[in-house]
Image: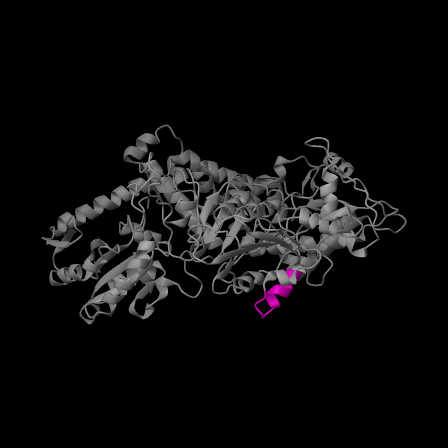
Amino acid sequence: MDAPCDTPRASPVATGAAGARASASAPVSHGEAEKWWKKDSELWVDCHTEQEFEQAVTTGDRLVLVDFFATWCNGCQRSYPELCKYAKDPELSSQVKFVKVCIEELKRPAKEAGIKSLPHAVVYDPKRGKLVGIDVPPSKVKNLKVNLMVILKNRSMDFKLDPNGFVIPVPPQPKGAQEAEAAARRAAAAALESATTGLGAKLLQGVEGAAAAAAATGAAVADAVATTAEAAAPLVAPADPVLAAAKAEFLKRFGSRYGYSGRIDALYPAEVGSRMEPHEHYLDYTGSSVYANSQLEAIFRELRGHLFGNPHSANPSSSFASERVEAARDLVLKWFNADPAEYQVVFTRSATDALKIVGETYPWGPQSEFAYLRENHNSVLGVREYAMAKGGRFHAVNETSVESWVRDSSGADITKFLDATSLSSGRRQVPPPEDDDGTVNNLFAFPAEDNFAGVKYPLSWINAVKAKSRPGRRWRVLLDAAAYVPTQPLDLSSVRPDFVSMSFYKIFGYPTGLGALIVRVDAAADLKKMFWGGGSVALATSAGDFHVLKCRPSEMLEDGTVSFLDIAALRHGFDLMTNLGGTHAIQGHVESLRAWTHQALISLRHANGQPVVALFGKHHLPEAAKVQGGIFNFALLKPDGSLFSYKSFEVAAAEAGLHVRTGAECNPGACYAYLGVAEAEVEALAGTKEGCHDDVEYAHVARAVVPAMHGAVESMDMADGRHVRM
């Protein structure tokens, strides 16, 4: 819906020298315990599935009034108490069934009902179907009872609305005319969906295989996988009897958990290996996953068979693209088991862009605290600049401090639990914002899995930190899931972060340049957007200081045209993942490789018995499967225990055909912690740099030996191993 929902806003008429300003009219914030749309639930029939909706509007003798609402719609929230009054009215409730439908949950019924703006109600007769749609914004909801009484007294009539929104009975059309009109509407909808008739056909002239492309589905992707796999030469068993015995023992140990029930040896060469030389091995999955051949075939088959227009237009190709974008939002929410009434998917350029949006729009104030785990990616660290710009303070905390804080029941602030390794900044002195409502907004950020050593952090922190909120002081949680979701299931029905950042190429390789911010609706209501551009603004004037942002959070936060062709490609990536068995199958495959590789690496010894590698992370713990992901980050050691140059290894690995990554992985906090390097030492070392790209491999610092430091100075990040060959 491109039109803004009913929202309070300032007059566009200038008042005085400064003029009047109307900015984003956000929905009123609601917390976990006060969801406005769930109040007075006993008065309503709540529909969450299409089957429930169909039963609600086609059964019984009473008229059916359906309130189509959105949890993010301010007008819906303001009209809801009045609608509840009508639902309590004995005169109406005896003759009218009151039904609620969230348009984010049931998009198809909302589309078929012709919902163009909110708040909106539709009246149905169980025997005749839809009678009339009525706008019910706060200014007009008072007329609803009058309209319902008119309909009740004239149930055999058809209805239309006058310019003021009042229902007018009109003689019903002959049955044949009604059927013809309905058939015409169905044909028009079918033509728009297929884009192969009328204007769509003219636009698609010269495109080969349009009909075949229209039939491409997830099943076609699965068939393509099977066909390609059959055509490619599968991996052969190791010729070396020692290696063959080792693989047999490995398969005996891990069984079907490894290799997607035995399919990996056929899938890998067909989908990935065919693009590499025989001696090459891709091990940089944390840097980027790799796309599958069948995935690309399905994507470009769809692009060849359909015309995608700018979603901001309203022509057939644009409508088709819009439907694909909305379907992709739904698919992302379904993949993470997120309630569409609670969460919105905002498409971004990357996970970094998603984090930047949070930093830019979060309602920081002079008393705000931004606490983040030390092992966060640089892109999370950068959010602190926004907090400090508004006078807030940041804290880089370690895992022990967070555990102590979330277990504490005294209500103490996180600063009480900072230890010597935690860092805090001072506040920048700035005046408080003019619209400050007195609530101090704090933010805690952590990675579900850090991209340096692959350590997985407790998702239970999310709800525990949010429970630290007190009247006048709110804690929200930002979860960086970019390294986690490619190989681990994230269930947003059991843990409820306010913000989740992710990138799709990390999951299935293509498309790049597309990420997402999954945001809770109530958290989005508090965001304070500054810049606005095409797509995010509903109304604006050129000369005056006036604009109204769109109400829907996803649209409000997406500036410019979304990358609709890349978004359309997402379903083919998810189809591929589903064909592999879904995230749980991928998790089992990765864990089997992680467990085996850990033992193999720590068993490597020089001739004098000294270890070859010093591993980082939690691979050594008994509960490693729960706390450690599939990343292997380690330092190479010489026979005398000194460090082997990671730069030399980088060159040697490339020559050997190993696609690996070296360095700090954009995660200075984790890197320095494992190396035992102090922040002050890094700052001092930075002054010795002489150019923009000169590397510093060794920093000689005199200090006592600490066993926990693992004797390492740099790292190499191997991939999670989803397609690593045994």
User: Image quadrant of residue 22?
Assistant: top left
Q: Is residue 526 left or right of residue 662?
A: left
- Specify whether residue 402 is painted magenta: yes
User: Image quadrant of residue 106?
Assistant: bottom left
- Specify whether residue 303 is painted magenta: no
Image position of 662 with respect to 164: above or below: above
Residue 577 place in picture, x, y as percent = 53, 49
User: Image quadrant of residue 143?
Assistant: bottom left
Residue extending farthest left: 171
Residue depicted at 29% across the width and 49% down the height:
117
Image position of 334 with respect to 277: above or below: below
Residue 89 place in picture, x, y as percent = 21, 69
Image position of 521 with respect to 532: above or below: below
Image position of 368 with respect to 573: above or below: below
Q: Is residue 129 left or right of residue 529?
A: left
The range drawn in magenta is 401-412
Residue depicted at 30% across the width and 58% down the height:
78
Residue in the foreground of this view, choosing between 235 and 92: 92
Q: Is residue 353 visible?
A: yes
Residue 190 place in picture, x, y as percent = 30, 43
Q: Is residue 203 left or right of residue 567?
A: left
Residue depicted at 78% across the width and 48% down the height:
712
